[in-house]
Amino acid sequence: MSGRLVPLTFCRRRYRLLPARIGMLRFLVEGYDGTLFLRTIEAATAVVELSWSESCTADASAIMAALSIELEMVPEEEF
């Protein structure tokens, strides 16, 4: 095989939202079937990390923009 099957670069961004909304966020992210991946960093303060393949950046950016409005997610400072 000459081509790579797995992208070399994954991007990530952290957000803060209301703790009660983490479940809804997880449900919505799973609906995008592999475009975004969600990880809870701190459940008590509702800090989550969304990651995506660099090749999906355009789609991931659009999805995160919509989710930010819908779920009132606030980007965290760079970590």
Image: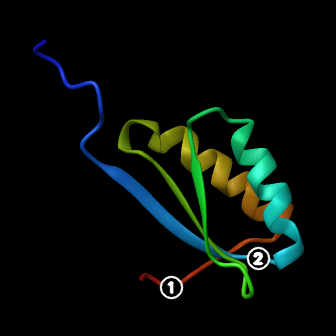
Number of residues whose C-alpha sits closer than 10 Å to that of mark 2, classed few (under 14), some (14–19) or many (20 or more):
some
Picture residue at 85% right of the left edge, 56% below the top: 24
Amino acid at circle 1: Glu
The secondary structure type at the circle numbered 2 is: loop
| Mark nearer the N terminus (1 vs 2) | 2
User: Which of the image's four quarters has the C terminus?
Assistant: bottom left
Q: Dots 1 and 2: beta carbons under 8 Å?
A: no
Quote the CA–CA distance across marks 1 and 2: 14 Å
In this rendering, the answer to whether 31 lies above or below 46 is above
Number of residues whose C-alpha sits closer than 10 Å to that of mark 1, classed few (under 14), some (14–19) or many (20 or more):
few
**Left or right: 36 in relation to 7:** right
**Left or right: 57 in relation to 35:** left
Amino acid at circle 2: Leu
The secondary structure type at the circle numbered 1 is: loop
Residue 17: assigned label? 2
Q: Outermost residue toward the right? A: 20
Q: Quadrant of residue 40?
A: bottom right
Is 65 or 40 nearer to us in this picture?
40
Q: Quadrant of residue 22?
A: bottom right
Closer to the eye: label 1 or 2: 2
Q: How is the image coloured?
A: rainbow
Residue 15 coordinates in the image, percent (x, y): 63, 73
Q: Quadrant of residue 47?
A: bottom right
**Left or right: 50 in relation to 12:** right
Disc 1 target residue:
77
Residue 51 coordinates in the image, percent (x, y): 49, 55
Residue 69 coordinates in the image, percent (x, y): 80, 62
Picture residue at 74% right of the left edge, 86% below the top: 44
Picture residue at 10% right of the left edge, 15% below the top: 2
In this rendering, the answer to whether 44 lies above or below 62 is below
User: Which of the image's four quarters has the N terminus?
Assistant: top left
